[in-house]
């Protein structure tokens, strides 16, 4: 009986130790898996932060290059005083393309060191569509930098249109 008891006790202790070791391996494995997920997540975050940092460096170097080019670009834009000729040249182009013409400046925004000035305008015209496209080509090829906010094109007669343009012209 002593021998049976000794085997039973040693078997129970061995089984208990095996069970404890199995539980220890199980919980350690779960903890390692959780920590590995955390490390992967932190790696993704670091990679994203590195991308953001590289983008910021690229933008800053681009901004420095743009600042160097800004004076030469602003030299391309006409001076504010030269915009007095803008409506006259538009009228001359409209008349040479056989279009009726009306023009008025609307609002003015002064330029800064970083942004050009703008003068909003409203241009009305009427005439044949083909003549109007030639007039737009003239504007595109002119020395003025013009941005259009809206075009309103209405047919009035068989091949005649009435045009309302709202836009802005850029200056120094």
Image: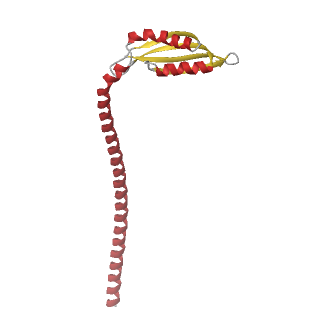
Q: Residue furthest front?
A: 96
Q: Nearer the viewer, residue 170 or 134?
A: 134
- Quadrant, the C terminus: top left
* Percent coordinates x, y for residue 153 in the rendering: 62, 20
Q: How is the image coloured?
A: secondary structure
Residue 47 vertical position relative to residue 112 in the rendered view, above or below? below
Q: Residue 49's image quarter? A: top left
* Percent coordinates x, y for residue 113 in the rendering: 32, 20
* Percent coordinates x, y for residue 91 in the rendering: 52, 10
Q: Residue furthest right?
A: 158
Q: How many marks?
A: 0
Q: Nearer the viewer, residue 36 or 156?
A: 156
Q: Residue 101's image quarter? A: top right
Q: Nearer the viewer, residue 135 or 34?
A: 135
Residue positioned 31% across, 27% down in the render: 69
Q: Residue 31's image quarter? A: bottom left
Give the side of residue 111 with respect to residue 125, left or right: left
Q: Nearer the viewer, residue 30 or 145?
A: 145
Residue positioned 39% across, 12% down in the render: 80
Residue positioned 33% across, 79% down in the render: 14
* Percent coordinates x, y for residue 85 in the rendering: 44, 9
- Quadrant, the N terminus: bottom left
């Amino acid at each position: 009986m002593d021998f049976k008891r000794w085997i039973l006790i040693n078997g129970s202790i061995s089984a208990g130790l095996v069970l404890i070791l199995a539980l220890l391996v199980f919980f350690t494995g779960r903890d390692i898996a959780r920590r590995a997920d955390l490390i992967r997540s932190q790696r993704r975050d670091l990679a994203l932060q590195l991308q953001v940092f590289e983008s910021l460096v690229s933008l800053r170097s681009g901004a420095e290059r743009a600042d160097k080019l800004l004076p030469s670009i602003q030299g391309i834009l006409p001076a504010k005083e030269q915009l007095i000729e803008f409506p006259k040249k538009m009228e001359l182009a409209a008349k040479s393309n056989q279009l009726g013409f009306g023009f008025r400046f609307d609002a003015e925004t002064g330029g800064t060191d970083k942004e050009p000035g703008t003068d909003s305008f409203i241009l009305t015209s009427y005439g044949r569509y083909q003549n109007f496209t030639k007039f737009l080509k003239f504007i595109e090829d002119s020395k003025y930098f013009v941005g259009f906010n809206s075009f309103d094109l209405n047919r009035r007669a068989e091949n005649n249109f009435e045009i309302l343009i709202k836009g802005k012209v850029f200056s120094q």
